Structures are given as C-alpha cells and as structure tokens.
C-alpha cells in the first residue's frame, strides 16, 4: 500500500508539465496578451474568494504568501483537478463548452522550528480562442466573399520554489523563485469561398516560446488577541527584467489551397525568426488581514494591485491599465472535536472577489474593453478523513466577465475544483527519552 502511495505522488510531479500543456479555454478575451491569467490558488484559497496574503495554516499550503510557510507543523502535499463549464454569449448567439485539467501540485514541510520550504507548479495563463469574420471584396466589379479566422492555442505554466523564515515570534518573511514557461500559437487564415483557381487562401502563423524568471517577497505579522490570531500580510511580486526572459518567435506567412479536403501549400511569402524579443510581466503588490479562531472559523480580506501598464509583449501595443482586485472569504467548522456527527467536522468555505479589469484602451473591433470587469462567488467544503490529518476538498466558483456594452460577449462560468491534501510527519527526527 505504501508503494502505491508514493508512486501516486511521483506520477503527478513527473507528468504535471504535460497536463498543463492542454488547451483550457476558448475565451475570445484570451486573444489579447498572453491569455487569461490564472491566480495561483490552492484549496485553502480557491474556495475562500482567493484570499491568502494574511492566512496561516498548520496543515494547508498557501502559495499566496511564502511567509505563511512557517505555520506548517507537518509535511503537506496537495494536487487538484478543475473542470470549467463556460457560456459565452452576445446579443446574437451563445456557445457552451467544458474543459478540465490538472490545476496545481505542491509539497511543503518544515525543516526546523522556524524554517519551512515549498515547491509546486500551477497554470499561469490559459490561451485559446477562435474568432471569425465574414466579408466581401470587389475584384473587377465582382463581390467575392471571404472569411478571416483568428485562432490560437497553448498557454503558460508556473513552477516555483519557496522558503519561509520566522525571524522572531510574531514575524515571518518569505520569498519565492518562479519560472514561467510555455508556448503560444497564433494563427490567422484568409479563406475565399469562391472556387476561382486564381484565388488562393493565405495563413499567418506565429509561434512564441517563452521562459521568464522572477521572484516574490512576502511578510506576515501575527499576534494572539483574546484567544484569536490576528494577522497582517504583504506580498510583492517583482517581474524580472527582459534580460531574464528568453523568447523565440517564429512567424510564417504562406498561401495554400484545399483539394479533396487536403491542404497544399503554394507559396511562402515570409519567414521570420527572432530571439529575446521584448517581454516583461507586471509587478504587483498585495495586502491582507485575517482573524482566526483556532479550529472554529477564519475570515480574511485581501487587496491586490497589479501594474499592467508595465506589461511588455513582443510587438504587441500595450494599452493595458493597472487593475485592482478585492477578495473576501473565510471558513467555518461547527465542532472539530465531534466524533458522532460527521457534518460538524466538515470545513465550510465561502468567499467573493471583484476584479476591476486591466484591458484599458484595448478594443475588439469597434468595441471598447475598458470597462470589462470580473466578479466571482465561491463555495467549498473540506472533508476530513477520520484518523488522519488529510482532507478531500471540493470547491465551486461562479463567475462572470462582462461590462455594460450589449455588443461585448458576456462570459459566465462555473469552475469545479477537486483536490486532495495529504498531511504526514515527514523529515522529522523522532525523539527517544
């Protein structure tokens, strides 16, 4: 049984990069920039509105602030699966789809009474879209119909290592080193519906391979007040300069025709390969407060500020604007010591978040995306395994991405999260009296 247990863990660590490489969205908003950014959230965060800057937990991993690692008393290991039910609609039509993927992996443990470490991986962006537009062109007095189709696939992943140190009682600091990596594929097709042999379809394909290194800094101040723990936290994400980013761009333009459903390339017009193009991610500053009643309840409030105006992406014109996110959430356990009624030892989680949007002056056609915002309601449960400190976690996120413009597509989603948190006393020396 123990062998299966360790093989199971090894499987998820080895194969996580392959699982993250899937296409996980068809959102038209992933067309801009690097795709739809994903907050780094584990079980304790995702079902509680995404809070975590000021959270401290003995048994859960909290990637929102590496300073929180000093609260771990056991080795914690967690993996998660997510499934997204999404509906995208405008005033003319709607489309529904479902995607699922491995969400995150992480392991953390104390190496002394005042030092703990953690390593893990999680999605950074989801990239996938399919946008079409039909029109006509006048050729020698004849209106010839054609279609322009933009579609993309790929995404970026994040691998990280963190350390937290308690400098003195009530004050901890932490830092994380991150590697952002992945591939984005962009395609634009011009296809003619006419059967004229002198008209050839054309395609432009851009492939971007990205590696970026950056780091985070975090701190937490905490003090017991009337049998409750009050914590104030801060977290700063520092984007590396472009000298620490490695990008390879391949741009290919060619014409083609389709005969008997087989595509034949006719002529290559352009092939450009470049390395180390301009690429820089935004810095961000997150602040949080929390109040914890041990083994009974917790509430937290986070404020995140991301400097999207700093974003540099290849030859992409940056009209993004700085954005803020407000997050509120917590959990409640009726009676953690009850041995008769299981529902009393379940951890009930709840939360809410609002994101002001960072699209700035970017447009999609004639539609301004400046007022695009997102809000999310969350609900979750932690089901403890009796005679164990491990927990099965389930979570639900109900979200909407929209603004007041009736022509702009509205995106609604339900994300279901299933994760498993293992706890054990690894790497601890046994004391013999």
Image: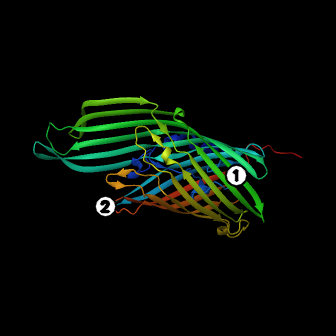
Above or below, 254 against 382 in this view is above
Return the residue at label 2: 93
Above or below, 67 against 211 in this view is below
Circle 1: is it few (<14), some (14-19), or many (20+) Cα within 10 Å?
many
Query: Mark 1 or 2 closer to N-term?
Result: 2
Residue 282 picture location, percent across and down: 52, 45
- Quarter-of-image position of residue 57: bottom right
Residue 312 picture location, percent across and down: 47, 40
In the figure, is residue 8 to the left or right of 182?
Answer: right
Residue 17 picture location, percent across and down: 52, 40
Outermost residue to the right: 433
Residue at (66, 47) in percent of width and height: 218
Is disc 2 placed on a helix, strand or loop?
loop
Residue at (49, 41) in percent of width and height: 18
Disc 1 to disc 2, C-alpha distance: 48 Å
In the figure, is residue 388 to the left or right of 28?
Answer: right
- Quarter-of-image position of residue 198: top left
Observer-nearest residue: 367 or 23? 367
Is disc 1 placed on a helix, strand or loop?
strand
Observer-nearest residue: 253 or 101? 253
Disc on res. 296:
none
Residue 96 picture location, percent across and down: 38, 58
Return the residue at label 1: 220
Image depth: mark 1 or mark 2 in front: 1
Above or below, 6 against 419 in this view is above
In the figure, is residue 272 to the left or right of 43?
Answer: left
């Amino acid at each position: 049984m123990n062998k299966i247990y360790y093989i199971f863990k090894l499987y998820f660590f080895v194969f996580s990069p392959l699982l993250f490489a899937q296409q996980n969205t068809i959102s038209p908003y992933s067309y801009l920039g690097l795709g739809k950014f994903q907050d780094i959230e584990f079980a304790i965060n995702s079902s509680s509105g995404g809070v975590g800057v000021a959270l401290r937990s003995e048994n859960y991993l909290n990637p929102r602030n590496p300073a929180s690692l000093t609260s771990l008393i056991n080795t914690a290991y967690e993996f998660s699966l997510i499934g997204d039910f999404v509906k995208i609609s405008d005033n003319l039509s709607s489309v529904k789809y479902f995607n699922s993927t491995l969400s995150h992996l992480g392991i953390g443990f104390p190496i002394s009474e005042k030092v703990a470490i953690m390593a893990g991986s999680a999605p950074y962006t989801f990239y996938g879209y399919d946008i079409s537009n039909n029109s006509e062109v006048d050729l020698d007095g004849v209106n010839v119909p054609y279609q322009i189709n933009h579609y993309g696939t790929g995404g970026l992943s994040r691998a990280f290592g963190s350390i937290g140190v308690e400098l003195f009682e009530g004050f901890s600091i932490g830092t994380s080193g991150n590697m952002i990596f992945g591939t984005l594929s962009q395609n634009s097709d011009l296809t003619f519906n006419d059967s004229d042999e002198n008209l050839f379809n054309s395609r432009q394909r851009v492939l971007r391979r990205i590696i970026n290194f950056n780091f985070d800094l975090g701190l937490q101040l905490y003090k017991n007040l009337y049998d409750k723990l009050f914590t104030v936290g801060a977290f700063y994400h520092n984007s590396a300069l472009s000298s620490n980013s490695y990008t390879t761009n391949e741009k290919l333009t060619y014409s083609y025709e389709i005969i008997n459903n087989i595509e034949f390339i006719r002529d290559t017009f352009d092939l450009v390969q470049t390395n180390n193009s301009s690429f820089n991610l935004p810095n961000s500053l997150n602040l949080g407060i929390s109040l914890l009643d041990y083994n009974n309840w917790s509430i937290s409030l986070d404020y995140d500020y991301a400097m999207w105006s700093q974003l540099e992406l290849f030859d992409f014109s940056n009209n993004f604007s700085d954005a803020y996110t407000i997050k509120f959430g917590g959990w409640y356990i009726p009676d953690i010591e009850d041995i008769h009624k299981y529902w009393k030892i379940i951890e009930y989680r709840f939360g809410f978040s609002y994101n002001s949007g960072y699209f700035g002056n970017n447009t999609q056609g004639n539609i301004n995306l400046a007022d695009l915002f997102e809000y999310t309601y969350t609900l979750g449960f932690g089901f403890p395994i009796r005679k164990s400190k491990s927990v099965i976690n389930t979570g639900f996120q109900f979200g909407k991405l929209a603004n007041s413009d009736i022509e702009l597509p509205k995106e609604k989603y339900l994300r279901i999260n299933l994760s498993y948190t293992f706890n054990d006393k690894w790497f601890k020396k046994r004391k013999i009296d």
